[in-house]
Amino acid sequence: MTPEDALKALVNIQSKIDTANAETLKEEHNLKLSYFNSLKETMAERDTLIKEIDGFWEAVLCCSECAELLAEMDYREGQEETSIDISWIDEIIVEYREDFKYYVGIKAKENAYFKNTLLEKEFSLFEGPECISTQIEWKNKKLIENPLVRFFSSADSSDDDTNMAIFQLLSDIYFNAVYYYVRLPEDESDCCEHKH
């Protein structure tokens, strides 16, 4: 067998692996979608109760590793470490959707950066349609260095790894929010002061 023939055979094998991998991703998404749909009523009940606790989402975000992980995503060699401002976040919404799509929404508090009250993003597991994203209505002080704001404002579907990483981070926080909240230190304000 010549090297060229070996390469053709390898490409064919890789194609079979890619096809099997795509099928696995579809099955995994459908399983998560089914799980999500089975929890909709429970999550709606939980989200209603969360609204009774002032500062719930900010406390969860501050005291989880969310801000630190976002900062790591944005870190470049040689730059000084910076904290990521998440104080503008009022509520998180995460959904698995039909057609292998993912949705994230964040309701925003009044803030110095933008006028939007809701930031939304929907993107697909597979290449294809452009992402649905939010047109940010900036005030004077832009927050473009914040990877979370960039996530919502980017309609670039070629950044699938970043989209999925942020979705998974916010999904973990969304589905496990009560777990994170009950693990807060007694004075969660100490925790939040270190994160923004």
Image: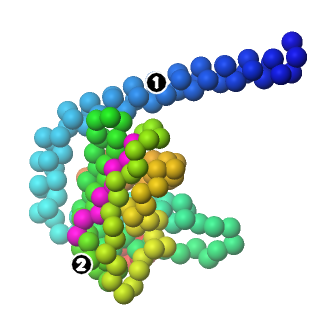
Q: Which residues are magenta?
A: 117-124
Q: Residue at x 33, y 67 (%)?
A: 135
Q: Which residue is mark 2?
A: 110
The amino acid at mark 1 is: Glu
Instruction: Answer with left or right where residue 78 lies relative to residue 147.
Output: right
Q: Residue at x 29, y 63 (%)?
A: 119
- The quarter of the picture where residue 12 lies is top right
Which image quadrant: the C terminus?
Answer: bottom left
Q: Residue furthest top?
A: 1
Disc 1 to disc 2: CB gap under 8 Å = no
Q: Residue furthest right?
A: 2
Magenta residue check for 91 = no
Q: Residue at x 46, y 24 (%)?
A: 23
Name the main secondary structure of what is drawn in magenta. strand
Numbered tag placed on residue 53 in the rendering: none
Q: Which residue is mark 1?
A: 23
Name above or below for residue 183 compared with residue 41.
below
